[in-house]
Protein backbone atom coordinates (compact mmCIF):
# COMPACT_ATOMS: atom_id res chain seq x y z
CA UNK A 1 0.00 0.00 0.00
CA UNK A 2 2.08 2.94 -1.21
CA UNK A 3 -0.87 4.97 -2.61
CA UNK A 4 1.14 5.71 -5.75
CA UNK A 5 3.65 7.78 -3.76
CA UNK A 6 7.23 6.93 -4.78
CA UNK A 7 9.31 5.82 -1.79
CA UNK A 8 6.34 5.41 0.56
CA UNK A 9 6.46 1.97 2.17
CA UNK A 10 4.52 2.24 5.43
CA UNK A 11 5.19 0.04 8.43
CA UNK A 12 2.14 0.40 10.64
CA UNK A 13 2.38 -0.06 14.39
CA UNK A 14 -0.25 -0.20 17.09
CA UNK A 15 0.22 1.33 20.53
CA UNK A 16 2.47 3.93 22.07
CA UNK A 17 4.97 1.37 23.36
CA UNK A 18 5.49 -0.11 19.89
CA UNK A 19 5.91 3.33 18.32
CA UNK A 20 8.26 4.48 21.10
CA UNK A 21 10.38 1.35 20.74
CA UNK A 22 10.67 1.75 16.97
CA UNK A 23 11.01 5.53 16.69
CA UNK A 24 11.41 7.08 20.14
CA UNK A 25 15.16 7.71 19.94
CA UNK A 26 14.95 9.33 16.50
CA UNK A 27 11.95 11.42 17.50
CA UNK A 28 13.78 12.55 20.64
CA UNK A 29 16.70 13.75 18.48
CA UNK A 30 14.27 16.19 16.84
CA UNK A 31 14.05 18.08 20.13
CA UNK A 32 14.74 21.75 19.55
CA UNK A 33 14.57 21.54 15.76
CA UNK A 34 12.17 23.84 13.98
CA UNK A 35 9.61 22.63 11.46
CA UNK A 36 10.90 24.22 8.25
CA UNK A 37 8.56 22.68 5.69
CA UNK A 38 5.94 20.07 5.00
CA UNK A 39 4.17 18.27 2.18
CA UNK A 40 0.73 16.70 2.02
CA UNK A 41 -1.62 15.37 -0.64
CA UNK A 42 -4.77 17.18 -1.69
CA UNK A 43 -7.25 16.66 -4.49
CA UNK A 44 -6.84 18.86 -7.57
CA UNK A 45 -10.58 19.16 -8.12
CA UNK A 46 -11.59 20.63 -4.76
CA UNK A 47 -8.35 21.33 -2.87
CA UNK A 48 -9.35 19.06 0.03
CA UNK A 49 -6.59 17.37 2.02
CA UNK A 50 -6.49 13.58 1.51
CA UNK A 51 -5.97 12.45 5.09
CA UNK A 52 -5.21 8.81 4.19
CA UNK A 53 -1.90 9.78 2.58
CA UNK A 54 1.22 10.54 4.61
CA UNK A 55 2.08 13.99 5.85
CA UNK A 56 5.76 14.80 5.38
CA UNK A 57 7.35 17.08 7.97
CA UNK A 58 10.78 18.61 7.38
CA UNK A 59 12.78 19.52 10.47
CA UNK A 60 15.83 21.34 9.08
CA UNK A 61 16.57 18.59 6.55
CA UNK A 62 15.32 15.60 8.54
CA UNK A 63 12.18 14.32 6.85
CA UNK A 64 9.57 12.56 9.00
CA UNK A 65 6.68 10.83 7.19
CA UNK A 66 3.56 10.21 9.28
CA UNK A 67 0.53 8.23 8.17
CA UNK A 68 -2.40 6.76 10.09
CA UNK A 69 -4.53 3.83 9.02
CA UNK A 70 -7.82 2.58 10.43
CA UNK A 71 -8.34 3.91 13.95
CA UNK A 72 -5.21 2.86 15.76
CA UNK A 73 -2.40 2.14 13.29
CA UNK A 74 0.42 4.62 12.76
CA UNK A 75 3.38 4.54 10.40
CA UNK A 76 6.40 6.77 10.83
CA UNK A 77 9.00 6.81 8.08
CA UNK A 78 12.27 8.67 7.65
CA UNK A 79 13.62 10.32 4.48
CA UNK A 80 12.04 7.88 2.01
CA UNK A 81 9.38 9.90 0.13
CA UNK A 82 10.36 12.00 -2.87
CA UNK A 83 8.01 14.96 -2.48
CA UNK A 84 8.80 16.17 -6.00
CA UNK A 85 7.78 12.92 -7.73
CA UNK A 86 4.29 12.63 -9.26
CA UNK A 87 1.63 10.46 -7.61
CA UNK A 88 0.74 7.60 -9.96
CA UNK A 89 -1.98 4.98 -10.35
CA UNK A 90 -5.08 7.06 -9.63
CA UNK A 91 -6.42 7.20 -13.20
CA UNK A 92 -9.59 5.18 -12.41
CA UNK A 93 -10.68 7.40 -9.49
CA UNK A 94 -12.96 10.42 -9.67
CA UNK A 95 -10.50 12.72 -7.92
CA UNK A 96 -6.88 13.48 -8.83
CA UNK A 97 -4.34 13.63 -6.00
CA UNK A 98 -1.60 16.24 -6.16
CA UNK A 99 1.04 17.44 -3.76
CA UNK A 100 1.32 20.61 -1.81
CA UNK A 101 5.06 20.31 -1.39
CA UNK A 102 7.89 22.24 0.17
CA UNK A 103 5.70 24.87 1.78
CA UNK A 104 6.78 27.11 4.58
CA UNK A 105 4.38 26.46 7.50
CA UNK A 106 3.28 30.09 7.38
CA UNK A 107 2.22 29.84 3.72
CA UNK A 108 -0.60 27.29 3.92
CA UNK A 109 -3.45 28.27 6.22
CA UNK A 110 -5.53 25.22 5.22
CA UNK A 111 -2.91 22.83 6.57
CA UNK A 112 -2.95 24.62 9.95
CA UNK A 113 0.42 23.25 10.94
CA UNK A 114 1.88 26.45 12.37
CA UNK A 115 5.42 26.72 13.66
CA UNK A 116 6.15 23.65 15.75
CA UNK A 117 9.00 22.87 18.04
CA UNK A 118 9.51 19.29 19.16
CA UNK A 119 10.37 18.82 22.83
CA UNK A 120 11.29 15.62 24.60
CA UNK A 121 9.72 14.70 27.90
CA UNK A 122 9.94 11.88 30.42
CA UNK A 123 6.72 10.42 28.99
CA UNK A 124 8.01 10.41 25.41
CA UNK A 125 8.14 13.00 22.69
CA UNK A 126 5.57 15.75 22.26
CA UNK A 127 5.06 18.60 19.81
CA UNK A 128 3.99 21.98 21.10
CA UNK A 129 2.63 24.90 19.12
CA UNK A 130 5.14 27.72 19.50
CA UNK A 131 2.30 30.26 19.39
CA UNK A 132 0.93 28.83 22.66
CA UNK A 133 4.32 29.04 24.36
Image: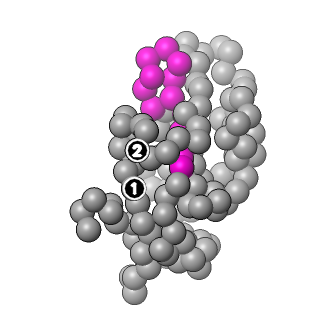
Q: Earlier in the sequence, mark 2 or mark 1?
A: 2
Residue 68: say if magenta: no
**Circle 2 Cα neighbour tier, 10 Å, few/some/many (<14 / 14–19 / ≥20):** few
The image quadrant where one finds the C terminus is bottom left
Q: Is residue 103 visible?
A: yes
Q: Is residue 53 visible?
A: no
Residue to which mark 1 is pinned: 115
**Please, which residue is most extreme toward the left here?**
132
Q: x and y percent of residue 45 in the render?
A: 49, 14
Residue to which mark 2 is pinned: 106
Span colored in magenta:
37-49
Q: x and y percent of residue 37 in the render?
A: 54, 49
In which quadrant of the rendered view does residue 77 lie?
bottom right
Judge by depth and name the residue closer to the eye, 92 or 95: 95
**Circle 1 Cα neighbour tier, 10 Å, few/some/many (<14 / 14–19 / ≥20):** some
Q: Secondary structure at mark 2?
A: loop
Label 2, label 1: how far apart the Cα atoms are: 7 Å
Q: Quick check: marks 2 and 1 in contact, CB under 8 Å?
A: yes
Residue drawn where x is 61% and y is 74% of the image: 26
Query: From the viewer's perspective, is 95 left or right of 1?
Result: left
Residue drawn where x is 51% and y is 29% of the image: 42
Q: x and y percent of residue 109 in the render?
A: 36, 37
Residue drawn where x is 59% and y is 61% of the image: 60
Q: Is residue 64 placed above or below 24 in the rendered structure?
A: above
Q: Is residue 90 placed above or below 120 in the rendered structure?
A: above
Amino acid sequence: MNMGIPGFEPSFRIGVDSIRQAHGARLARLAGRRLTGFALVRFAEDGEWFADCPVVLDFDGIQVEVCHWKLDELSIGWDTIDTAAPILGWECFELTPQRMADLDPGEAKTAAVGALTVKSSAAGVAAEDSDRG
